[in-house]
Amino acid sequence: MADSYGAALRGPRTRLDADAIRATYDRYANSYDSWFGIISRKARRAAVAAVNATPGAKVLEVGVGTGLALPLYAPEKRITGIDLSRAMLLRARARAARLGLQNVEELLEMDAQATNFEPGSFDVAVAMFVASVVPDPYALVAELRRVVRPGGKILIVNHFAQDRGPMWWLERAMAPASRLLGWHPDIRMENIFCAEDRAGAKVTDMRPLGLFRLVELSN
């Protein structure tokens, strides 16, 4: 598997770094729920429904953000959330406390590409709207494979660039502003997943307008 990952493209045209990502999402923290939270609501609900339907109790949510997904998990799921932005995590912790979410076990400031978890710590890992944010999406998938037990499930929800049409032109036009935006508009499936993963993945277009796709991988 490691060799096939090495064949994957390592990322879109403009690189991000952890400091730029942290600064951008610290800045977004106060307004995130009111704009992106609305845009991504249906995709988020569908992703958590997929997690809830997956066997296993121990769930890692990568890029937990302000905790918008936390109230949606089934009570029997034991949730650990991580994020690079301290400001986002403060809002997530406040949300979990306010709603009394007893199944949320930890909300930690951590790099999704290099976590501190032991191998096979989780039954399920879900990364919602994160693959276009991290500096190295290849490393993200590799780390999720490391921390999810054999036979577990990895779920990635993200926007992926189109192959043609008006959206393709818009994505390419926005790409040079990736550092300012805090995400890659031009990220593609092959920037994240090797050919073997793409062949074995279940991919579902998600509303609204197919803007996001859910990719399900067995570990």
Image: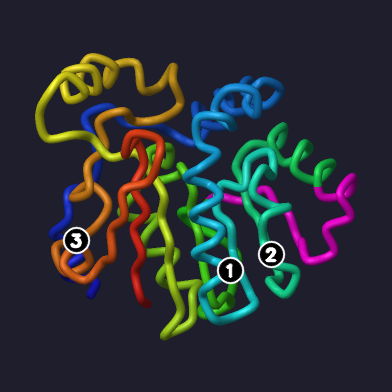
What is the CA distance from the residue labelled 1 to the residue labelled 3? 27 Å
Percent from the top left, x then y, of residue 129? 46, 42
Q: Which residue is mark 3?
A: 194
Residue 185, quarter of the rendered image: top left
Q: Are the residues at dot 2 and dot 1 in contact (C-beta closer than 8 Å)?
A: no
Q: Earlier in the sequence, mark 2 or mark 1?
A: 1
What is the CA distance from the residue labelled 3 to the residue labelled 2? 28 Å
Q: Nearer the viewer, residue 124 or 41?
A: 41
Tell me, for residue 96, which label it has, or none. none
**Is 100 displayed left or right of 174 in the figure?**
right
Residue at x 37%, y 54% (from the top left corner): 214
Q: Secondary structure at mark 3?
A: loop
Q: Earlier in the sequence, mark 1 or mark 3?
A: 1
What is the CA distance from the residue labelled 2 to the residue labelled 1? 11 Å
**Is 70 displayed left or right of 170 in the figure?**
right
Residue at x 58%, y 25% (from the top left corner): 23
Percent from the top left, x then y, of residue 65? 63, 40
* Amino acid type of the residue that numbered disc 1 sits on in the rendered structure: Asn
* Amino acid type of the residue that numbered disc 2 sits on in the rendered structure: Ile
Q: Which residue is mark 1?
A: 52
Q: Earlier in the sequence, mark 3 or mark 2?
A: 2
Assess whether residue 102 is covered by the magenta stretch: yes
Magenta stretch in the rendered image: 96-111
**Is 157 displayed left or right of 35 in the figure?**
left
For disc 2, the neighbor class at 10 Å (few under 14, some 14 to 19, many from 20) is many
Q: Secondary structure at mark 2?
A: strand
Q: Which residue is mark 2?
A: 79
For disc 3, the neighbor class at 10 Å (few under 14, some 14 to 19, many from 20) is many
Kindly report which numbered mark, 2 or 1, lies closer to the viewer in this rendering: 1
Q: Secondary structure at mark 1?
A: helix
Q: Which quarter of the image is occupied by the C terminus?
A: bottom left
Residue at x 22%, y 42% (from the top left corner): 188
